[in-house]
Image (spheres, rainbow, N blue to C red):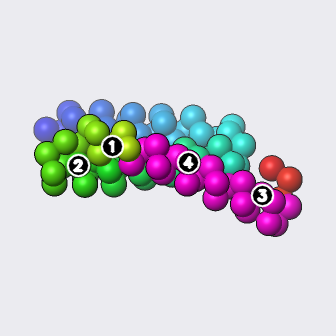
Amino acid sequence: MHRYGAILILSGSLLLGGCSGLAEENKYTLTGAAAGAGIGAAGGLVVGDPGTGALVGGLIGGISGLLYGEYWKDELDLGF
């Protein structure tokens, strides 16, 4: 069991480290997609299909994150 935990921590840190060069609106999109996929998978687990839940949640979260990033970019004129 400890082996899987170490793999999870290592892969998570690699994924987060890869986001350092992204534009701000892309970070919002990626964060929204990841959060949506996690929430969708949890919701899908309840009804018996976590894969579909993760897919739908990731799509909705990604689109929401993109719209959020674009809104704040225009609203605050951050120039990113």
**Highlighted range, magenta:** 57-77
Q: Identify the mark nearer the N-term, 2 or 1.
A: 2
The location of residue 65, given as percent across then percent down, is 58, 53
Q: Are marks 4 and 3 in contact (CB under 8 Å)?
A: no
Residue named by callout 4: 63
Residue named by callout 1: 54
Q: Are marks 2 and 1 in contact (CB under 8 Å)?
A: yes
For the question of whether residue 9 can be seen, the reply is no
The location of residue 30, given as percent across then percent down, is 54, 44
| 10 Å crowding of disc 4: few (<14), some (14-19), many (20+) | some
Residue named by callout 3: 73
Q: Secondary structure at mark 2?
A: helix
Q: Are marks 1 and 4 in contact (CB under 8 Å)?
A: no
Q: Nearer the viewer, residue 58 or 80?
A: 58
| 10 Å crowding of disc 2: few (<14), some (14-19), many (20+) | many
Quadrant of the frame with the N terminus: top left
Residue named by callout 2: 44
